[in-house]
Image: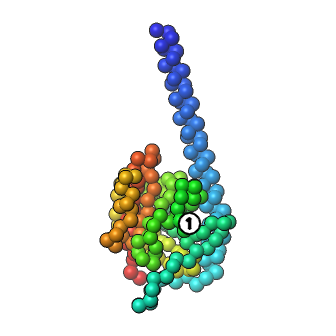
Amino acid sequence: MKKTGLSLILAGVLLLTGALGITIYNVADSRRAEKAVEAILGPIAEAISQQETTPFVRPEGEAIPEMPVREQDGLRYIGIIEIPALSLSLPVLENWSYDLLKISPCRYAGSYYTNDLVICAHNYAAHFNGLRYVDIGSDVYFTAVNGETFHYVINNRETLTPEESDRMITSDGEWDLTLFTCYIGGATRCTLRCSLCDE
């Protein structure tokens, strides 16, 4: 009986130690991501500020252009996403991978020129953790590296599973911008759907 009790106590201590270790790692990783964004955002914002910032208007009849990119520290960025309700301003990488997501938000699919841009990020406190708290109707701004600006409004929030990742990309043109991140635990995705504002 005493041995069983001691074994349970030891098991409990090991579980608590493991949980503490994971928590410390997650906090440190989130802080590292915050520092990475801070280091990148300044130079990209500075480069954009030197250009004329104007809303994008596609001339009729012209082909859809490729999104411009800016290389910074060996990585390619397409612009800056801003969510004023979260006091959030983040650079967005041209493509995504699990390694790149540790640095900043990434383009998952689509383009702002074709009104089907999808941006993903980790749920770090300094990245997209706050998406679950943003009110429907909040503004989202995207500024491309060439200074073109896009104003969106959040119209819908969905919870999707990893198996529904194909639904992030909307083929019916219903949503102009989609933002998503994992809920804590990674079993589901917090997904915000946004529409481009006519200005």
Q: Nearer the viewer, residue 198 or 117?
A: 117
Snapshot quadrant of residue 192: bottom left
Q: Nearer the viewer, residue 164 or 115?
A: 164
> Residue at position x 51%, y 68% from top?
81
- Colour scheme employed for the rendering of this structure: rainbow
Dot 1, how many residues are within 10 Å of its Cα: few (below 14), some (14-19), or many (20+)?
many
Quarter containing the C terminus: bottom left
**Spot occupied by residue 75 in the image (x, y as percentages of width and height):** 63, 66
Question: What's the amino acid at mark 1?
Answer: Leu
- Report if residue 88 is visible in the image: no
View extreme (right): residue:
73
> Residue at position x 56%, y 39% from top?
22
**Spot occupied by residue 162 in the image (x, y as percentages of width and height):** 40, 52
> Residue at position x 58%, y 36% from top?
21
- Report if residue 185 is visible in the image: yes
Determine whether 143 is above or below 9 in the image: below
According to the picture, the residue beneath numbered tag 1 turns out to be 93
Determine whether 127 is above or below 48 in the image: above
User: How many numbered circles does the render carry?
Assistant: 1
View extreme (top): residue:
1
Determine whether the residue tagged by mark 1 lies in a helix, strand or loop. strand
Q: Nearer the viewer, residue 89 or 163?
A: 163
Determine whether 195 is above or below 128 in the image: below
**Spot occupied by residue 193 in the image (x, y as percentages of width and height):** 38, 65
**Spot occupied by residue 108 in the image (x, y as percentages of width and height):** 47, 64
Determine whether 110 is above or below 189 in the image: below
